[in-house]
Amino acid sequence: MSFGAWLAAAVTLGALIAIAAGRLAPYLALLGALGVLVLAGVIEPATALVGFSNPAVFAIALLFVVAAGMRETGAMAGLLQPILGNPRSPRRAQGRLMVPVIAASGFLNNTPLVAMLLPIVKDWARRIRVPASQLLIPLSYASILGGLLTLIGTSTNVVVHGLLIASGRPGLGMFTITPAGAVVAAAGFAFLIVFGAKLLPRREDGLSGLSDPREYTLEMMVEEGGAIAGKTVEQAGLRHLPGIYLAEIHRRGQVLAVVGPEQTLEGGDQIVFVGLISAAVDLRHRPGLAPAARHVFAIGDKARERWFVEAVVSHRCPIAGQSVRNGRFRTRYGAVVIGVARHGERLRRRLGDVVLRAGDVLLLEAPPAFVDHHRDSTDFYLVSRVEGQSPPRHDRAGFALAIVGGMVAAIATGALSLLEASAVAAMLMLVTRSVSQDTARRSIDWQVLVAIAAAFGLGAAIQVTGLAGHIATGLIAAAGDRPHLALAAVYLVTLLLSEIITNNAAAAAVFPIALETADHIGAHYLPFVIAVMIAASACFSTPISYQTHLMVYGAGGYRFRDFIRVGLPLDLLLGVVAVIVIPLFYPLF
């Protein structure tokens, strides 16, 4: 090999070690590797920066905005909540999550699917008291397994399809890969259900909010004709909530102090909850529930432009010693009291009747200007916004679903490219006010984008220096003229390259070698093409091997070794399954 190939191998290995040891964030390690290769003159700056001009990176950025629209409107949560339910164990939670994700991923691109589901799964994990680290790797893995079901399930399949046509051979049908892909996906699902709960880490980051000592008393109202009106407490998902509990229901002047799981909710019910702020703000995202004070003061549509704010009442507050209602808090401050926390004390009065004291912590629904106007006010010791808790826009859920459905249809039919469809969808999310400009801007995870772009650049460097070709040619040559061994070698080399460079780059590097190998031994080309498609996608043992792995890496608080522990045995299992079943569905001769 040339000096450039050896150096590319060394810096790639160094980047992997740095990420595995937790010394550097993935984006820094990958950028560092590219920097070394550029400074050494091994690759041109244009090659290093190729990922930053790749349409896929821009598409992912736009898909974060689309995902934010689905999250902010509650559209995706509304579709998934009946399916996800309230499982009692990590294994059941993983099963409830992976089945719909695998099914959806057969027809949705993996990246936007994971981008849309990531925040929903994190919220769900907190609600069912299962560490997010037990669910986010299964989310990413399930999206990949589902991508094996159809031609449009993943961009890698489309890339191989294009390469096949360019070689002068017929292209693939929508379901050509389905027989082998379905078996491999089923094997991967079974492995994760049986071993996932044991192999995945149990980090409690997603439940950190439960240690907050402040306990709020809140009043929420069941909206007339809303999503939970007419349902029981259990059917509405209001039992076993993390960090909060349903204390009582006020209905037409009566108080239901003992509320069982079979109690039916009625429109207009005012429900009193007691719990922590992290759980309190989650209630705001539930369709059919709204702060009771909002109805009392007829805030209406302006509620979408309001934030959750915490304010600590000072001894100089003019309404200290008066009740919320008599002090006319809403009129004086333009904000509505949603909850009150008083040193862990359970407040037995309705919120409007609570007499405010110095030191009370108020949870308010307030306009953005409230924080600026009252941050230095003597009425409050402290005023701060509860970050990331913008109110859901349930009335826009229909728009969001239609936008995403149109985006998927445009991509599936080829009417628009992934980038074009994502751009149109993101624009429509903003135009229909399904997501605000501020939320859209904050929804983009720049570290993930840089890591993905740098991974594209490193993959290009490995190809340009000839390192990929040397690895591929050496491994496949060792198989000789034995067709099954040659098929296994094609699968193995594609898998190895996919783990260290992008899956599309790996498929592009091995594809011509796979065709040459098939021609050399007189075998049919299709089994080798299917092997490349499956191996390039079914890569699970490193976080840089697939875009969705990078997306869940930080969100789940994972370490490099977590992917190796779960993904390496999964790689081996699916490799054996694929090499066995591919010749059964696509004969070698």
Image: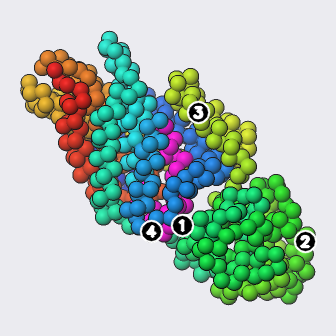
Three-letter amino acid code at disc 4?
Arg
Q: Main secondary structure of the magenta part?
A: helix
**Where on the picture, by quarter, is residue 326?**
bottom right
> Which badge, 2 or 3, is on the more N-terminal residue?
2
Which residue is labeled 2 in the image? Answer: 332
Question: Is label 4 or label 1 in front?
Answer: 4
Which residue is labeled 3 in the image? Answer: 407
Secondary structure category for the residue under label 3? helix
Question: Is label 2 or label 1 in front?
Answer: 1
Please give left or right for residue 48 compared with residue 4 in the image: right
Label 4, label 3: how many angstroms apart (C-alpha)?
35 Å
Please give left or right for residue 567 compared with residue 393 in the image: left
Secondary structure category for the residue under label 1? helix
Question: Is label 4 or label 3 in front?
Answer: 4
The residue at the point 61 percent across, 53 percent down is: 78
> Which badge, 2 or 1, is on the more N-terminal residue?
1
Relative image position of residue 46 (x, y in whole percent): 43, 28
> Which badge, 4 or 1, is on the more N-terminal residue?
4
Which residue is labeled 1 in the image? Answer: 127
Label 2, label 1: how many angstroms apart (C-alpha)?
35 Å
> Which badge, 3 or 1, is on the more N-terminal residue?
1
